[in-house]
Image (tube, helix red, strand yellow):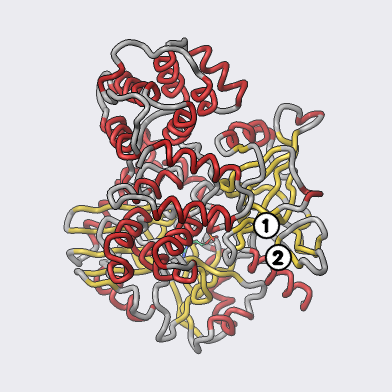
Amino acid sequence: MKFATLTSCFERLEATSSRNDMTALLARLLAGSAPDEIGIVCYFVLGEIGPGYSGVNLGIGDRTAAAAIALAAGADPASVEAAARELGDYGDAAARLTGRPAEGLAEFFPTAGSLTVADVHRGFMEIARASGPGSADRKTRILAAMLAAATPLERRYLIRLVTGEMRLGAGDMTLLDALAEAFLGSKAQRPHLEHAYNLSSDIGHVARTLQERGLPGVSAISVTLHRPIRPMLTQRVALLSEILERIGSPVIAVEEKYDGERVQAHKDGDDVTLFSRRLSDVTHQYPDIVRHVRRCVTADTAILDGEAVAFDHETGIYRPFQTLMRRRRKHRVREVAGVIPAIYRVFDLLYVNGESYLRRSYPDRRARLEEVLGRDEQISPAGRIVTGDLDGITEFYLSCIERGLEGVVCKSCAEDSFYRAGAREWQWIKWKTDYAPDLSDTLDLVVIGANAGRGKRAGTYGSVLCAAYNNEEDIFQTVCGMGTGFSDADLADLPRRLAGVRVDRRPARVMVNPQAAPDFWFAPAKVVEVLGLEITESPVHTCNWDPERRRGLALRFPRFVRWRDEKSPEVATTVAEVAAMFRRRRGA
Ligand code: AMP
């Protein structure tokens, strides 16, 4: 496929204002892709270069991008940077350039004007492979060569792809719908594809398999070591007393809820890989956990699900999430790991010695986990009780809070308590009441717009517009504008934090009423944790929108708590959850 075909589809996708049209455009694009390209097309649509877990890192920031654009257009980097500032985007700056490329760029792409999708992918892989002395220069030259061989529109998307700022607003579920429409005749077939995607976390692999071997091939996709499984998620309730009824099994397990980072560990002999909740490879961040897994997991091969937590061995108290996140700065990992050791609390077993455990009940998985995991301070199964009694749950919850934990996660012990990869169902319910007096929990919302700041806030944003995720329709619906809770530093940082997702018009998957239309729009990407007082009906916000009564739901008195960069927009609080909170409150 010509890269130009892809980029003209991108342009149309950006101009689309309905999710259905977006799916139809994507379905046509995918149906016209060759088997060796369809995977790449999927990654590019999502603004990625490969499956998230593959860890392909181009290592290109704005500076390198500017240098490459300058080289391709015979301009100087300062003028490229000025154009990018004026246009708000390096992609648009690249598209506008008209000069002649520097000498000697034809080495990689000899025939200008005929880039294919495969060429672009090959170029990206070359860029990713360049390492060691002189690599920055080599990366710049390869990118410049691609730009020199590209049309203006192609240049725009080449730059947006390499800098990670695609902003098409298509999510993985939209893409799965499009695949189902293109190859299985209807979106109704999406669940088959979604299942394979949940197990493999690689949409390109699902697409290739579907095109080559149809549904039987996709159904044969199974758990594979060193490929992350999409994690099972938790539900929430408004009252502790609802938990037993909701889960529906006579006894439940009540587990300690740790406030750390979700980590899925794959052990393959001595080879250990760790994945984050967003499925990226975080092995290098936790050398201590790698050692614990090697040392204490007795099975040859295993996949564990659990939480990496900072723990103070002197006081016996768990330390908060923020402490652990200080390890994020890669170059200091070893130094910081000495000061803030991470321990691993394992709450599930997904695979052992060649066998998938996803379709085993939670009690079976837990029993096997206890067999294969040698207990010690550094690594152990999650602490828990098994009970059918509300007082038992309450007491255990209070003892967790005393020990510095966040709360509890209650889990079904029924026969069908399978591990539901990627799903948020009633088998797992979290309970934490640390901040909101009225709401039982904070909400994780997606920032989709902002208003310009005035007075003291001139130069930054005055408030951000937040949305919940409607997982049935795969769209985002607004719940509140939020301007409080930010520190001065948070406020000053807003424009930088949101620059990469800014778009010119309302993204297709976002539903906003005209009264709430913000000054600036953002592609749904950034998740923020928000505390609020209560949920009320609203004629302005579109969350749970009732077209007849022209009413939605709003969160009153929203306050910023923290950014949740580890969460993708599709795991944000759902519209159904907000509606359930509202109904319960009214019933209370
Ligand atoms: P939240 O991030 O507040 O939506 O809560 C869900 C998260 O709690 C999961 O993604 C895990 O990272 C974390 N967690 C901590 N302890 C447990 C546990 N025992 N079982 C399941 N999830 C847990």
> Does residue 36 lie above or below 152 as drawn?
below
The one nearer the camera, 405 or 83, is 83
Q: Secondary structure at mark 1?
A: strand
Q: Residues within 10 Å of mark 2 (few under 14, many from 20)?
A: many
Q: Position of residue 528 (x, y in %)?
A: 61, 49
Q: Position of residue 114 (x, y in %)?
A: 34, 30
At label 2, which amino acid type do we have?
A: Asn
In the picture, the disc for residue 544 is: 2
In the rendered image, the quadrant that contains the C terminus is bottom right
* Residue named by callout 1: 477
In the picture, the disc for residue 326 is: none
At label 1, which amino acid type do we have?
A: Gln
The one nearer the camera, 509 or 323, is 509
Could you tell me which residue is drawn at 78 percent across and 53 percent down?
557
* Label 2 C-beta lies within 8 Å of the nearest ligand 1 atom: no
| 1 or 2: tag closer to the N-terminus | 1
Task: Name the outermost residue toward the bottom.
Answer: 250
Q: Secondary structure at mark 2?
A: strand
